Image (cartoon, grey):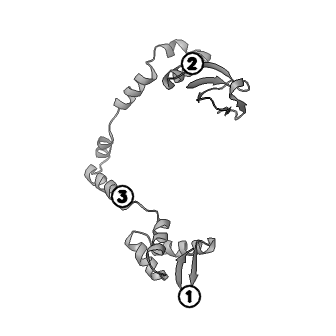
Amino acid sequence: MYSVVGCSACNNLWIVEGRPETTQCSRCGKRRTFGKLKQFVETDDEDHAREVRASMLANRQGHGDAFAELDSFAEMDSQVRDAGMDDEEYLDRSGLDTDEVAAAGERSRRDGSRSNKQVVLDALSTLDTPDEAEIVAYARERGVSADYVRQALEKLSRRGEISESRGRYRRL
C-alpha cells in the first residue's frame, strides 16, 4: 500500500509505503503520526502514487496541462532504458578495450577484490605470527605497497586490532 501524504508545516508531498506508526517529512524533517497526516491518495500501485504526487506538484506550479501530456511513469521508464548507448558501446567510444574491461571485472569478482587494509589483515590471519617483512611480501604480491603496509600495521596496533611482540604480529 502506498499513500501520498502532505506536511502541514511546509506543504511538502511525499509517498509512504505501508502504514508506519510515524513518518518524517523529507523536506522539513518534522516527524508526525501517520494517521494524522493528510492522505491524498492510497493505492497498491507505486507508479500510480508517483503519478498522483507528480501531478499535484505540477498543478501547484501551474504546469498541470504540460504534465497531462506526458506519458505514464512506467512508459517513461521503458523509454529511458531504451535511450542512449549501452555500457559496451560507451566503453568502446571512450577508447577502452571492452574485452579487457570484461576480463578485469571477471578477475575482480574471482579474486574477491580486497581493500588494502583487508589484504594486511588477511596476511595476519594467513601467516603464522609473521614479521613486517613477511606481511609486506604477502601484500606486495596482491598489489599493496610496503609503505601502506607499515602505516596500516602502526594504525592497527594503536587501535588494538593487532599486537606486536618482538617484531612479530598477530590479530587480536
User: Quarter-wise, where is residue 104 in the image?
Assistant: bottom left
Compared across the picture, whether 9 is left or right of 39 comes to right
Q: State the residue in front, 133 or 124.
A: 124
Other residues around mark 2 within 10 Å, as few (<14) / some (14–19) / many (≥20): some
Which quadrant holds the N terminus? top right
Circle 1 residues within 10 Å: few <14, some 14–19, many ≥20: few
Of label 3 and label 2, which has the lower sequence position?
2
Q: Amino acid at mark 3?
A: Ser
Depicted 170 relative to depicted 80: above or below: below
Query: 151 and 111: which one is in front?
Result: 111
Q: Quarter-wise, where is residue 127 in the image?
A: bottom left
User: Distance of mark 3 from mark 2, alpha carbons?
Assistant: 46 Å
- What is the x, y in percent for residue 7? 69, 25
Vertical position of residue 89 compared to residue 70: above or below:
below
Q: How many marks?
A: 3
**Image position of 65 (left or right of 143):** right
Please say if 140 is above or below 25.
below
Q: Which mark is residue 166?
A: 1
Circle 2 SS class: helix
Report the residue at 53% width, 24% height from top. Answer: 50
Residue at the spot of label 3: 108
Viewer can see residue 127: yes
The residue under label 2 is 58
**Dot 3: within a 10 Å radius of its alpha carbon, few (fewer than 14), some, or many (20 or more) residues?**
few
Residue 141 position, x and y percent, is: 37, 73
Q: How far across and down, in percent of the image, does residue 96 sit?
A: 30, 50
**Does label 1 or label 2 sit earlier along the sequence?**
2
Q: Is residue 13 above or below residue 108?
A: above
Left or right of residue 80: residue 163: right
Image quadrant for the C terminus? bottom right
Relative placement, left or right, of 153 versus 28 is left
- Helix, strand or loop at mark 1: loop
